[in-house]
Image (cartoon, grey):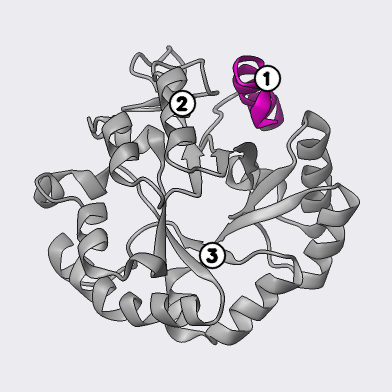
Amino acid sequence: MQIGAQLYTAYNHTTTLEDFSKTLKKVADIGYKTVQVSGTCPFEPEWLREELLKNELKCVLTHVSPMSLIEGNLEKIIADHAVFGCKNIGIGSLPPGGSDPIERYELFREKFVPIAKEMRDLGAKLHYHNHDQEFRGCFAEKSVLDRILEDFPEDSIDFTLDLGWAAWADVDVVSLIKKLNGRLSRIHLKDYLDEIPEGIDEKEVYLRPIYEGKLDYDAYIKTLSEAGCEYMLVEQDSCYNEDEFECLRRSFVNVTSRFPEVK
């Protein structure tokens, strides 16, 4: 199991190719060896391949627009990913559509079961990333993840389980990791505090570097290892008034000082 950086954390620093290149170097200089590419400016796959090689980094996951998979050329998307050595392609949430959450999920199932199968047959893997809403409201009894487990062939989709958002939805994260055993090759590490400091423009949750929040990451990481996780990707959606790379550095140090084997 290895720790990586979800580049969405530094999305303000990947809006141009020049800044994107600098970001990859900064992430590598922290000590990360793997990244998820998400929320960046457009790039040619050959460009990313060379930048990753230059910084001795490996891209282990991306997030793409769900609509690009519905409307685009799957073979081209997968071939472009192959250029920079990534077979794992994720979506960040349910795609838009439907008049209510259940209808939205049903439309997702209708569109994405065949897409997931085609991706599998082309040698790629679809990954689904959760927020908190997948466990709330009409999904409180049977979550979106439960429905995906029922509706999609097991070998066609995995879960980029976001531990922080699952915890924020009052889910027993350790039990959920055990439930998804073998389907969590790439997950998101996220931590938070409930108490929001004065001056921070946030209404509900105060995101923090890993081990600087309230979550029990000793238990989470131990359970992830037992569940077959390969890559734990640090994602801090907002760093507020702190430097994003400093937050990524602290998460890296906080995790690897306790689990040096994940470097």
**Quarter assignment of residue 113:** bottom left
Label 2 or label 1, whichever comes before in sequence order: 2
Mark nearer the viewer, 2 or 1: 2
Contact, mark 2 vs mark 1 (Cβ under 8 Å): no
Residue furthest front in the image: 226
Label 3 or label 2, whichever comes before in sequence order: 3
Q: Is the magenta stretch mostly helix, strand or loop?
A: helix
Q: Please rate how many residues cluster around mark 1, counting C-alpha atoms within 10 Å: few if below 14, some from 14 to 19, many from 20.
A: some
Q: Mark 1 sits on what residue?
A: 253
Q: Residue 184: x percent and y percent?
A: 44, 48
Label 1 or label 3, whichever comes before in sequence order: 3
Mark 2–mark 1 distance (CA, rounded to whole Å): 17 Å
Left or right: 79 as drawn, with respect to 186: right
* Residues shaded magenta: 245-263
In what quadrant of the picture does the N terminus appear?
A: top right
Whether residue 44 is visible here, answered yes or no, is no
**Quarter assignment of residue 156:** bottom left
Q: Residue at x 64, y 30 (%)?
A: 262
Left or right: 50 as drawn, with respect to 195: right
Q: Residue 89 carries which label?
A: 3
Left or right: 104 as drawn, with respect to 162: left
Q: Does the magenta stretch include residue 253?
A: yes
Q: Residue at x 37, y 58 (%)?
A: 93
Q: Which residue is drawn at 69% across and 72% down?
A: 82
Which residue is nearer to you in this view: 205 or 249? 249
